[in-house]
Structure formats: structure tokens, C-alpha cells
Amino acid sequence: MFSVIPPESCLLSIKSLHLSSVQFWGDEYVATLLKRCAALEDMVISRTRYDNVKLYSINVPTLKSLTINNSREKRTDDDKENHGFWINTPVLQTLNIKDTVSNFLMLEFTPEHSKSYNFICRFHIDRGSVFPCLEHLELYMYMFCGWVNLLASILNESPRLQSLKLMSNHSAQYNDPMNFWDEPAVVPECLLTHLEIFEWRQYENTVQHRKVAACSATCLKMATLSARSRNRDDRMVMKLKKLKRISKTCRLVFE
């Protein structure tokens, strides 16, 4: 068990880190360890029933590749509180992930540079869904191409998803072909049976945003949209009410 984090001088030059079945005194020890790895570029996390971290906080400005394998057996206390991953990696290029246990996932990409960048996400599917237990998803979309593909992929692999929060970036390149949303031929299971809460911050009344919002589930109880421009609210309400997949009983809230 990690009770003492190695000093920063011992970790400054580390570029690759593999954590497997690691036990820490608390979740904050993970954040402290990674903060001291100032040059880290590649990270692999393999979780088993023997580790004890509830929420992995992966805030690494230099990380380019992240691989997560969390396919351990589910524990009896897993449903009592949120457990999973918070990922804030400004220059991440590749994410390989398989997670059959976590119920919480936050992906935040906030590049320091003004240009958008390409992002590759691979989900490992042996059988069933990649995120069969995922209930809460937050996706922060800052200047990377293909965020709609990432969102679609996660929705397809998260049959129990109950709440979804999106945060847009004002200067995102909405004309980029990688950001075009195509209505799925088969509606993700979570949109038909589980998704009840949908929140979108910095929503813009663009064609692409409306297409994404149109797939916001038939069983929604509340959809909260925070618009970039408040003077668009009336038109936004009218157009969103016409979208065929908004639940008839859904409460639309504009802030």
C-alpha cells in the first residue's frame, strides 16, 4: 500500500507509468503521485479487486496516451457512491479503455493551444458493453476533432447511463467534418430506457447541436440547456420542441 509518495525529484523524468492492483491510503494520493510526474506521457491503469481507489483523478498536462482496464469483479459497495475516473489531459492523443465496473466517467480535454487536435479513442469489446455499469457521464468538448464520434461511441456502450452533461467550447470548429452528427441507425439502449437527466452548458443553436439534442432520449425527465446567447432562447425553445425524440413529459429548462 502506498503510504508515502516518492519525492518529486525521483519522479520528474518518468515518461511511462503502469499502475496495477495498487492500494493507496486515499484517492488524493493518486493525484499527488501524478502531479509529481511532470514529464509523464504514457500511462496504463489495470484495476483488480485488490486496489482500493474510488475515483481516479488523472490530471496530467503532458499525458499523450492513456490505457485503462477496469474489468475486475464488482464489489458489494460499488453501488453506494460514485466510482470511476476523472480525466483532464490537455494533450491526450490516444485513449484505450475497457471499464465494466465504474458508474462515473468525466472526460475533460482543455488544450492550451488555440488549434484543434485529433483524438483517437478505442474501446475494447470482448462481449457485451464496454461500460455496462456507467450511470453518470460528463464530457467537456474543447477544441478536439471528432467529439461527436466519441460521444456516440460511449452512448452505444453504456446501456445504463442515467445522466449526461456536455460542456461546449465557444470557438469549436463546428464546420469540421469530424464534428458532424449522423443519426444512428440503431438508437443506443440508454436513450430508450435509462437516460433521465441531460445538461448542456454553452449550447449553441446550430444544426449540429440540434441534431445531437434530438437524440436526447425518449425517457428524459429534465433537459437543461445553458445557451451562449440569451436572445436566442425563444427560437431555441420552438425548434427543440419540434425535435421528434424529445420526451413528451420532459421538462425543458433554459438558463
Image (cartoon, grey):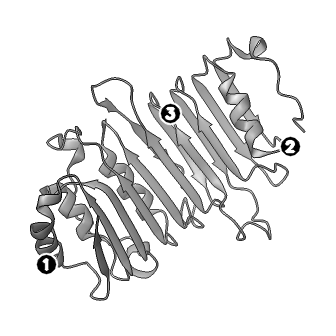
Q: Which residue is mark 1?
A: 242
State left or right for residue 7 relative to residue 249. right
The Cα–Cα distance between marks 3 and 2, rounded to whole angstroms, is: 24 Å
In x, y percent, where is residue 175?
14, 42
Pointer 1 or 2: first along the chain? 2
Q: Which mark is residue 89?
A: 3
Instruction: Check the image and report above or below for 151 versus 127.
Output: above
For the point 12% across and 61% down, which residue is it? 232
Instruction: Check the image and report above or below for 186 versus 151.
Output: below
Secondary structure beneath disc 3?
A: loop
In x, y percent, where is residue 13?
67, 11
For the point 25% across and 66% down, which residue is it? 213
In x, y percent, where is residue 191?
38, 74
> Badge 3: how crowded within 10 Å, few (<14), some, or many (20+)?
many
Q: Which residue is mark 2?
A: 25
Pointer 1 or 3: first along the chain? 3
